[in-house]
Image (cartoon, rainbow, N blue to C red):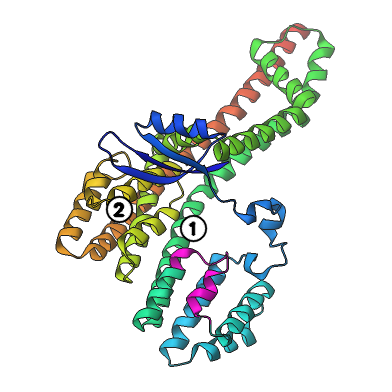
């Protein structure tokens, strides 16, 4: 269950945010463990989307057009088309009519038709797209600012750049993981095939001679028996474990914080995750501040795009510090596990010079390059490691079989 809380630290700094916990008492204990004194803890307003079954939310099974979801690439195409047409002097109503006429995707067409209807009824574009779950608040705020300053084309361009960088970052991380994951699947498939197909035939052969098998062969055959007899139970246990951990991560605040912190400590992988989080945060903050969005709103929206819960919790505390007048760089400096000294220094330079957006852009580009290098190092390290594992599995099985065959040869002689 989600709770809203207000708390203060020993210096009477106020912190206001939300926390997932089993009870109000658990929220208070968690706050006290962080050195905060709870002032009020109330049950957060329930999101009506939570009442919809997960399978319906994933496939857009609800009838309400505002609950439909589209891919980031389709959203990028929409933003790009809108930027081009508005820059060419096409009015919003005509631009929407053109998009409706050319759209092939049924979900997107329903969304565009609803937006077009809203525009004819006098509702602004930002208000209209803000009512759809598929449009993140970040882009809604940028478009709203573009409407206010009369530069809607620039606003859409900023949205396009942000989406491109987000898609690129995720794509690079996924691409880097494809080959190691393929090797891992290959190892598992190899163990299963050898245990189910290859080893049972040798087991019958060895048993017919009645000879004592070497220790390695006995271990290999034992593994084969376990997989043959309990394979489905093992698979079911793994599924239950994964689902259980996922539920625990969503419902238990302490476990959620522990796992989020542990992810950042994993050698090589943790650094890749941290750099990706910093890149996304810096990119979002730079675009929002340049668009004229106020600092507090920019921090809140940038926090929402960060995937790691520990980093998000740190940003919650930064937001509360900034709310009472603390400079951003000072507050960021209190969370050195996430925000290194270089990042904090560049934010300080940006704040003092009044060019925070430029400083964040430079930092985003630098951290993106570092993230790419770290991702490549991770791939380079994982590939030979997985190759060695495969060679070790095959070698162990082959040696155990050869040993047994030589033992049978001695018995025959």
Label 2 sits on residue: 323
Figure quadrant of residue 43: top right
Tell me residue 378's x, y (percent). Answer: 42, 43
Give the quarter of the figure containing the N terminus: top right
- Mark 2, secondary structure of its residue: helix
Mark 1 is surrounded, within 10 Å at the Cα level, by few (under 14), some (14 to 19) or many (20 or more) other residues, namely few
Determine whether 137 is above or below 261 in the image: below
Q: x, y percentage for residue 173?
A: 47, 52
Mark 1 or 2: in front is 2
Q: Position of residue 357 (x, y in %)?
A: 26, 65
Task: Provide residue 277's location: percent of width, then percent of height.
Answer: 39, 50
Q: Which residue corresponds to the image point at 72% horizontal and 8% vertical from the top-left?
A: 410
Q: Which mark is residue 248?
A: none
Is the residue 360 above or below the residue 258 in the image?
below
Q: Secondary structure at mark 1?
A: helix
Residue matched to label 1: 171
- Give 92 or 337, whichever is nearer the viewer: 92
Residue at screen point 41% across, 59% down: 301
Question: What range is drawn magenta here?
Answer: 123-139
């Amino acid at each position: 269950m989600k709770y809203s809380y207000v708390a203060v630290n020993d210096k009477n700094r106020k912190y206001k945010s939300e926390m997932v916990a089993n009870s109000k008492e658990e929220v208070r204990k968690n706050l006290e463990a962080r050195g905060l004194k709870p002032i009020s803890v109330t049950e957060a307003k329930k999101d009506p989307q939570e009442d919809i079954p997960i399978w319906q939310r994933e496939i857009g099974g609800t009838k309400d057009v505002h609950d439909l979801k589209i891919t980031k690439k389709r959203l990028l195409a929409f933003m790009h088309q809108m930027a081009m047409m508005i820059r060419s002097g096409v009015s919003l109503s005509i631009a929407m009519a053109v998009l409706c006429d050319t759209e092939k995707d049924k979900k997107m067409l329903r969304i565009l038709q609803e937006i077009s209807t809203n525009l004819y009824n006098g509702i602004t574009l930002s208000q209209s797209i803000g009512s759809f779950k598929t449009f993140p608040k970040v882009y809604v705020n940028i478009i709203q600012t573009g409407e206010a300053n009369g530069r809607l084309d620039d606003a859409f361009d900023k949205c396009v750049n942000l989406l491109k960088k987000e898609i690129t970052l995720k794509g690079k991380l996924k691409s880097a993981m494809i080959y190691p994951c393929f090797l891992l699947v290959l190892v598992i498939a190899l163990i299963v095939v050898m245990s189910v197909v290859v080893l049972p035939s040798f087991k019958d052969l060895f048993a017919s001679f009645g000879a004592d098998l070497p220790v390695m062969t006995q271990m290999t055959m034992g593994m084969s028996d376990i997989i043959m007899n309990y394979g489905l139970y093992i698979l079911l246990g793994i599924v239950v474990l994964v689902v259980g951990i996922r539920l625990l991560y969503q419902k238990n605040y302490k476990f959620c914080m522990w796992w989020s912190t542990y992810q950042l400590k994993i050698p090589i992988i943790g650094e890749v995750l941290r750099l990706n989080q910093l890149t996304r945060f810096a990119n979002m903050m730079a675009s929002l501040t340049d668009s004229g969005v106020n600092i507090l709103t920019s921090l809140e929206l940038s926090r929402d795009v960060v995937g790691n819960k520990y980093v998000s919790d740190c940003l919650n505390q930064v937001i509360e510090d900034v709310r009472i007048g603390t400079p951003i760089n000072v507050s960021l400096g209190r969370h050195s596990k996430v925000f290194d000294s270089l990042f904090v220094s560049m934010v300080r330079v940006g704040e003092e010079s009044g060019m925070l957006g430029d400083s964040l852009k430079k930092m985003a580009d630098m951290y993106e390059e570092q993230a790419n290098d770290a991702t490549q190092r991770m791939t380079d390290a994982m590939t030979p490691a997985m190759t060695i594992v495969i060679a070790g599995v095959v070698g162990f099985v082959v040696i155990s079989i050869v040993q047994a065959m030589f033992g049978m040869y001695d018995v025959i002689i």
